[in-house]
Image: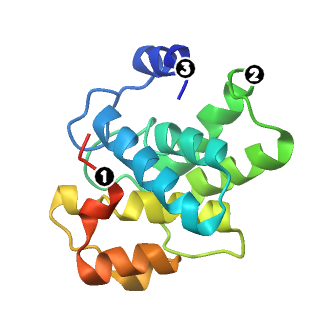
Amino acid sequence: MDHKFIEFLERKSPFFHSSIHGIKHWKTVERNGLYLSKFTGADRSVISYFAYLHDCMRQNDQIDPDHGLRGAKFAQEHRSLIDLDDDQFEKLYFACETHTEGESTVCETINTCLDADRLDIGRVGFIVDPFYLSSSEAKRIAEEKDFQALGSKI
């Protein structure tokens, strides 16, 4: 991810420094998604923007049902800073908006974004459940508890 975009998020996101939903989580989601994209063929640019935007407008670290929509709207408000074409941006918006709902789609890029986030749920004490994952590689990682395949923790 572009360093200037991360600096922008540091200024604008109230959760940039959150130990649960902040920059460390965002980098982990990006790492997870880029790894999974090798298996799914997902759009790596969309994955990277999703990683940094999906939780950037949270209001708390607990239950915050509209945070995905707020993140998507934040992306829309700052569309000129996001280097994606309209089709890519539509995928980004949808992935941010719906990332907590658990529904897979026919789009591998969106599914990979969601899987990348879900593979990091262990940070808050939940077990990664393969049922909620879309790709065969994400399911394999969860079933075999092979999280080292994703690379080192950030």
In front of the other: 13 or 119: 119
Q: Whole-percent x and y of residue 85?
A: 83, 38
Q: Whole-percent x and y of residue 4?
A: 53, 13
Q: Inspect this view and state whether residue 111 appears.
A: yes
Check disc 3 and report the residue beneath it: 5
N-terminal of the pair, mark 2 or mark 3, is 3
| Disc number lying in front (2 or 3) | 3
| Residue type of the residue flagged with mark 2 | Ser
Q: What element carries label 1?
A: loop
- Is disc 1 in contact with disc 2, using a CB cutoff of under 8 Å? no
Q: Which residue is drawn at 47% across and 66% down?
A: 115
Q: Whole-percent x and y of residue 47?
A: 58, 48
| Disc number lying in front (1 or 2) | 1
Check disc 2 and report the residue beneath it: 80
| Residue type of the residue flagged with mark 1 | Gly
Q: How far apart are marks 3 and 1 (CA)?
A: 24 Å
Q: How far apart are marks 2 and 3 (CA)?
A: 11 Å
Check disc 1 and report the residue beneath it: 151
- Quarter of the image for residue 70 reads top right
| Disc number lying in front (3 or 1) | 1
N-terminal of the pair, mark 1 or mark 2, is 2
In front of the other: 8 or 130: 130
Q: How crowded is mark 3: few (under 14 residues within 10 Å), some or many (20 or more)?
A: some
In the image as oriented, which residue stretches furthest toward the right?
A: 86
Q: Whole-percent x and y of residue 2?
A: 55, 22
Q: How far apart are marks 1 and 2 (CA)?
A: 32 Å
Q: Residue 114 carries which label?
A: none
In front of the other: 101 or 81: 81
